[in-house]
Image (cartoon, rainbow, N blue to C red):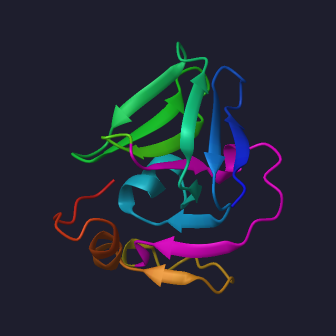
Amino acid sequence: MTRKRLQARCLCGGVRIDADFDEVEIGACHCDSCRRWTAGPFLTVDGAKNVVPAGVDALGIYRSSDWGERGFCRNCGTPLFWRSVDGEHYALSATAIDNLGEPPFVRQIFVDSKPHWYAFANQTEMMTGAEFFAKVAPTQEEPHG
């Protein structure tokens, strides 16, 4: 398997995130926290490895739950990533990645939190919050964000 190195950057260019991915696929999170943070669903490329940030003086980290943190540019406000508190799981903002190409849109999570007034036309895997947590953290209670 060939890893692909991708780079995300904020609007002002003050923060850059380089990361490797085994697969480049788009996912959407519809949880309340992601929608409030991004003013819509958070579109991500999940599974970032070897994450290397640059411009860390402008990188803000907000701990949004007991198990998750959000990274953003403190200068321009661009949402850049969600990561688990232990740093084992990263999801980079798909809309912040340069030269993303045409990856498939494969998954939506927290579909039970999505408002009724929007929907994607793509056929994707659809997971409720409970289904998502059962898959990624079967022993953990259902936290948000």
Residue 139 seen in render: yes
Magenta stretch in the rendered image: 88-111
| 101 magenta-colored | yes
Q: Give me the residue at 62% from left, 75% from top.
A: 106
In the orientation shown, which residue stands out farthest toward the bottom?
A: 123
Q: Position of residue 113 (x, y in %)?
A: 38, 72
Residue 77 seen in render: no
Q: Position of residue 91 (x, y in %)?
A: 52, 51
In the orientation shown, which residue stands out farthest toward the top?
A: 57
- Please tell me in which quadrant of the rendered image residue 43 appears: bottom right
Query: Left or right of 67: which side holds 123?
Result: right
Front position in the image: 68 or 38: 68
| 52 magenta-colored | no
In the rendered image, which quarter contains the N terminus? Answer: bottom right
User: 89 above or below 136?
Assistant: above
Q: Position of residue 122 (x, y in %)?
A: 68, 82
Q: Position of residue 105 (x, y in %)?
A: 67, 72
User: 23 above or below 78?
Assistant: below
Q: Give me the residue at 42% from left, 50% from top.
A: 89
Q: Give me the residue at 26% from left, 65% from top.
A: 137
Front position in the image: 2 or 30: 2
Q: Give me the residue at 55% from left, 17% from top.
A: 58
Query: Left or right of 135: which side holds 125?
Result: right
Front position in the image: 63 or 133: 133
- Please tell me in which quadrant of the rendered image residue 101 appears: bottom right
User: 113 above or below 61?
Assistant: below
